[in-house]
């Protein structure tokens, strides 16, 4: 079982930056793939960025070159550095932990943190 707590959201002007943090409980954090999802009003939740337990990363095309995901296994933390923010980045951002074994997987979610990009 993993508990996730996000922080770092807020209101920022277009072109600004925010750093989201996700604190995870449990002793097996390093085994989990960690992801950031977001959900805007009236839209489906979408994957923003992911980082595997070995450190490989992937990004949605809409955020490539602007967002950076990282993790600190010693601190059980995952981060999302968001630069050059745009109004369309406005959403609730969720931290996700995924443990995969064979063809099965378990997903854990945080409560979400609101990011609003507006002038």
Image: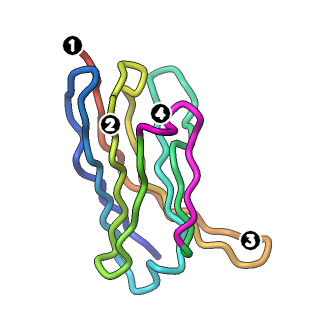
Q: How far apart are marks 4 and 1 (CA)?
A: 20 Å
Which element carries disc 1, helix, strand or loop? loop
> Residue 112 in the image: x percent, y percent?
35, 46
Task: Provide the residue designation for mark 3.
Answer: 104
Q: Is residue 47 found inside the magenta-colored segment of the image?
A: no
Region in magenta: 55-66
Sooner in the amino-acid sequence: mark 4 or mark 1: 4
Q: Which of marks 3 and 2 is nearer the N terminus?
A: 2
Q: Distance between the residues labelled 3 and 4?
A: 25 Å
| Left or right: residue 96 compared with residue 102 | left
Q: Is residue 88 above or below residue 110?
A: above
Q: Which residue was labeled with disc 1? A: 119
Q: Name the residue tied to disc 2.
A: 83
Q: Would you name the residue on which mark 4 appears?
A: 39
- Residue at x-position 21% and y-position 27%: 12
Q: Report how far apart the C-alphas of labels 3 and 1 lie in the structure.
A: 44 Å
CB contact under 8 Å: marks 3 and 2: no
Distance of mark 3 from mark 2, alpha carbons? 35 Å
Q: In which quarter of the image is residue 101?
A: bottom right
């Amino acid at each position: 079982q993993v508990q996730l707590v996000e922080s770092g959201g807020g209101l920022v002007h277009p072109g600004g930056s925010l750093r989201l943090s996700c604190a995870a409980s449990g002793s097996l954090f390093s085994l989990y793939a960690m992801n950031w999802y977001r959900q805007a009003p009236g839209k489906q939740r979408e994957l923003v960025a992911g980082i595997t337990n070995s450190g490989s990363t992937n990004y949605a095309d809409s955020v490539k070159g602007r967002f950076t995901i990282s993790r600190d296994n010693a601190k059980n933390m995952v981060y999302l550095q968001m630069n050059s923010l745009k109004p369309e980045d406005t959403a609730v951002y969720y931290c996700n932990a995924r443990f995969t074994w064979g063809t099965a997987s378990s997903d854990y979610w945080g409560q979400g943190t609101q990011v609003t990009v507006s002038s």
